Amino acid sequence: MRVLVIGNGGREHALCWKLRQSPLVREVFVAPGNAGIAEVADRVPIGASDIVELADFARNLKIDLTIVGSELPLTIGIVDEFHKRGLPIFGPTRLAAELEGSKAFSKDFMRRYGIPTAEASICSSLPEAETALRKGSFPRVIKVDGLASGKGVFIVQSLDEALELVRDIYLTRKFGNAGDRLLVEEFLEGEEVSFMALTDGERVVPFAPAKDYKKAYDDDQGPNTGGMGAHSPAVVLSTEVAAEIMRTIVIPTVQGMEKEGRIYTGCLFVGLMLTADGPKVLEYNCRFGDPETQVQLLRLEDDLADLCLRIARGNLGEARLTWKKEAAACVVVAAAEYPGEVRRGLEITIDPVEDPSTFLFHSGTEMQDGKMVNVAGRVVSACAHAPSLSEALARAYAGAAKVRFDGVRFRTDIGRRALEQLRHKADSSPG
Ligand code: AMP
Ligand code: GLY
């Protein structure tokens, strides 16, 4: 079959790489892709949000399956557009994607179905936000309602800092309509983990949990990013807690969405905090994670094309996924200023990778005048699998060192805490 992947990140590179291994797949297209994805897929020069053009392309080329990587096309209704034309597509409809597209909707939804999450006030004006902030203690979390490319969440330490921030958001309207409503949320303490599941709206099959490193700098310092590294297994998550997450969060979410007439299909990604009171939802995403997908797909034994096609047809069947016993790790190679405004057009050189278990999935790369340059802050996901997590991390770091450009940087502590947790488990196990 012919498959079209929509997006241009490391996640989409990994998706195309995995789809290419399916005996069902004859051709893989990517719109718009990047310089690295061009090695495993044919690039189509259509933007990820040009949903009518994408549907025209899928119809004209008789694409058998379209997989949407990024959230924006989902929240503006790409799946609805494809359905209208009878074209098979993997991902939630616009109404279902509101789980990610509106934090106010998802908070209300979780309350309606008793899904564990942080307490929050939903505010529609500056006075309401000020009143909410004057009640309760600090730190608190302020979130803009709509999509903000991971830049709309703020942890504030004091009332003064919080008031200044909400005034700035309402008065400058720097988030546009996305900032019309704000959540003032309880700060949760614990370890974060990313939990993904595939669903056809009824049946749900969990992905191997992954750990994402969200903060820009070592020791979880600095601002939030899209993700600076990842590994799977997540280590911090036991099998029992994973089962609890399915029972108390993932399944009630899929069932609740069905009750609301917003049947959810595709990949449901739940960002969780493992608190002393159990796992609680930080956010929903309506798509695969980036960079979580890169490590999960390195471990997935099953045929991704077959799974996604069954979901696009609304019939997942009795799927049970099989994961390599090996661990996988990813180190994101970024531009100096990321997640701030980065310099673009920096020439990138990448030394050859000989190790067959190491993969450099590209994010913001393009070819310009015969040279590879960066066009975004996250540039390459250096990924590897190996029998142990420590070896997978060592190989991923060796891969990251092969990428060079002015100001290149990456976190140097990806997986460190997980390795400590593993050592602790080994020390405390009864021989
Ligand atoms: P979100 O987009 O809602 O996942 O928020 C981005 C990041 O902010 C999360 O990955 C967490 O690191 C942090 N965060 C969000 N909500 C909370 C919360 N209620 N308590 C503590 N940290 C949070
Ligand atoms: N890595 C988190 C995300 O994809 O949103």
Image (tube, grey):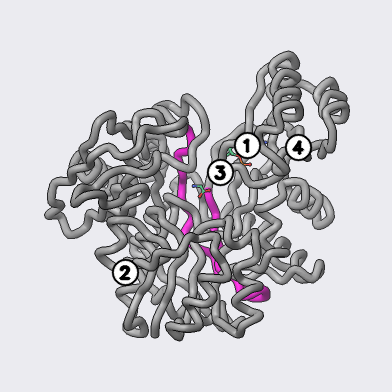
Q: Residue at x 30, y 39 (%)?
A: 345
Residue closest to the eye, 194 or 247: 194
Q: Residues within 10 Å of mark 1 (few under 14, many from 20)?
A: some
Q: Earlier in the sequence, mark 2 or mark 4?
A: 2
Numbered label attached to residue 179: none
Please tell me whether mark 1 sits on a helix, a strand or a loop. loop
Marks 2 and 4 sit apart, C-alpha to C-alpha, by 40 Å
Residue 113 drawn at (x, y percent): 80, 57
Please tell me whether mark 4 sits on a helix, a strand or a loop. strand
Res. 240 in view: no
Q: Which residue is mark 1?
A: 152
Which region is colored magenta? 194-215
Q: Which residue is mark 4?
A: 183
Marks 3 and 4 sit apart, C-alpha to C-alpha, by 16 Å
Please tell me whether mark 2 sits on a helix, a strand or a loop. loop
Which kind of residue does numbered mark 3 sit on? Answer: Ser
The C terminus, quarter of image: top left
Residue 321 drawn at (x, y percent): 46, 71
Q: Residue at x 35, y 29 (%)?
A: 336
Establish if 30 lies above or below 148: below
Res. 373 in view: yes
Q: Earlier in the sequence, mark 3 or mark 4?
A: 3
Residue 198 falls inside the magenta stretch: yes
Which kind of residue does numbered mark 1 sit on? Answer: Gly
Q: Which residue is mark 3?
A: 149
Residue 63 drawn at (x, y percent): 45, 82
Residue occupying the far front of the picture: 369
Marks 3 and 2 sit apart, C-alpha to C-alpha, by 26 Å
